[in-house]
Amino acid sequence: MSDTIAAVGTGDKKSAIGIVRMSGDRAADILERVFRPKHGSVSEMKAGRLYYGELLDAFGEVIDLCLATVSRAPKSYTGEDTAELHCHGSPVILSEALSSLFRAGARQAEAGEFTKRAFLNGKLDLTGAEAVADMIDAESPLAAKNAVLQLSGSIFEKAEGIYSSLISISSHFQATIDFPDDGIEDFRLSEYRGTLNAAREELSRLASTYERGRYVREGLPCAIVGRPNVGKSSLFNALLGYERAIVTPIAGTTRDILNETLTIGGLALKMTDTAGLREAEDAAEAAGIERAEAAAGEARLVIGVFDGSQPLKPEDERTLLALSRAPAAIAVINKSDLPRAVGDIPGAVPVSAKTGQGIDGLAEKIGLALKPYSGDGGGLLTNARHLSHIAGARDAVSAAIDALDLGLTPDAVLTVLEEAQSALASLMGRNLRDDVIGDIFSRFCVGK
């Protein structure tokens, strides 16, 4: 990887500081051609320190007064020589800085190429590299926390421990065959049953975290349902804290679903405001109601809204049915600022979306409903690729235990265990094809 790559690492929006980064064998040489330190030269710059100076274009004209730093291989993010320019955060200045680097010999980095180089140079395992992208994409504190823990090795360390234990079994068996006269302890596969059982249990536990992990990463789907004019859109707006949905006294105003994200208890809640549930009066309303019922069916949390100023109506039965079918459900009696006429609904939360009364209490109840999904925010599988390899390893270990119970020969059992070793090696990025690696890093932003 002799070529040197460059990219803006802080996006294309105006900001106080913008960073342009390089990685490759010529990073320091190229920096010397575009950066003039106030004191000394680039070759005299010590690694990890910031130096003030002038950023120059190809003609020696000053583009910006900025800071620069260098890092030497292998003590850098990518494991290569790297350099950074910390400029004023004007997109124009950053573009000019990048152009200057290109003229000096760098090339545009591809999406995720910095982190890809870190992986290929052994600075990150593949689960940690993927966690970098998850950190950038995080929509909630829990998603960010889980990504940080994965970057720190929460998944890798568990996989590595299991992988090492399985390799130890295989290597012991192979050693007794290859070196029968070297006094190696006799191989008895039955003595490793505890190791295999522990591996299966840990792999099963990891696989079981995927559903929670996926919701931590992507957000939990939540549908607000109810018959027309009970205040669903008003409640939607009240929870968001701004006017997102159109609210009118006319029943059936909401014809299509609206989606927004709200963070409660550290978890992103993907809220959907839906059309009123009733017998449709026209084709457009029928389509909206069909989408509302589909959203309720897919949601992990359903908030059913009832008009507290009126007795329950036949249309409310659809709302009660949606609540009964939901994995988690909260009934809300809206319009509590008006005289109450609705009958008792067990566990219902009284609110007034119009005045804001009870909204904080509803948010607390939503937070409690999200507890089973938020977990501890650490060690959760969030990636379908990770799940596939973990589940594959679990199934292979389970098959090996079954083979052991059937009294098959050690070589037959260990052949099955090799499938588990291969799955875990793929999880950690130790035997992946180039096209798989390219696909993984293609979802990164260019500067990462």
Image (cartoon, helix red, strand yellow):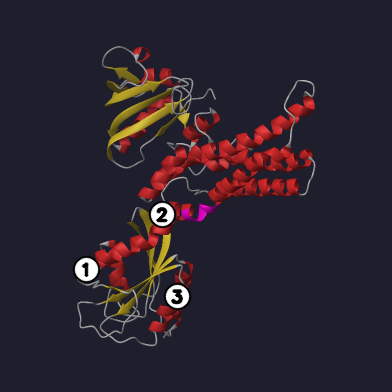
Q: Secondary structure at mark 1?
A: loop
Q: As shown in the figure, which amino acid type bears the numbered disc 3?
A: Ser
* Disc sitting over residue 374 in the figure: 2
- Residue 267, horizontal then vertical, whole percent: 37, 54
* Disc sitting over residue 356 in the figure: 1
Q: Is residue 310 above or below residue 415?
A: below
Tell me, yes or no, if residue 267 can be seen here.
yes
Toward which corner of the image does residue 91 lie, by quadrant?
A: top left
Q: CA distance from mark 3 to mark 1?
A: 27 Å
Q: Is residue 158 left or right of residue 19?
A: right
Q: Is residue 188 left or right of residue 445?
A: right
| Mark closest to the chain's N terminus, 2 or 1 | 1
- Residue 313, horizontal then vertical, whole percent: 36, 87
**Which residue lies under the disc numbered 3?**
324
Q: Is residue 164 above or below residue 226?
A: above
Q: As shown in the figure, which amino acid type bears the numbered disc 2?
A: Ser
Do callouts 3 and 1 mark residues in contact (Cβ within 8 Å)? no
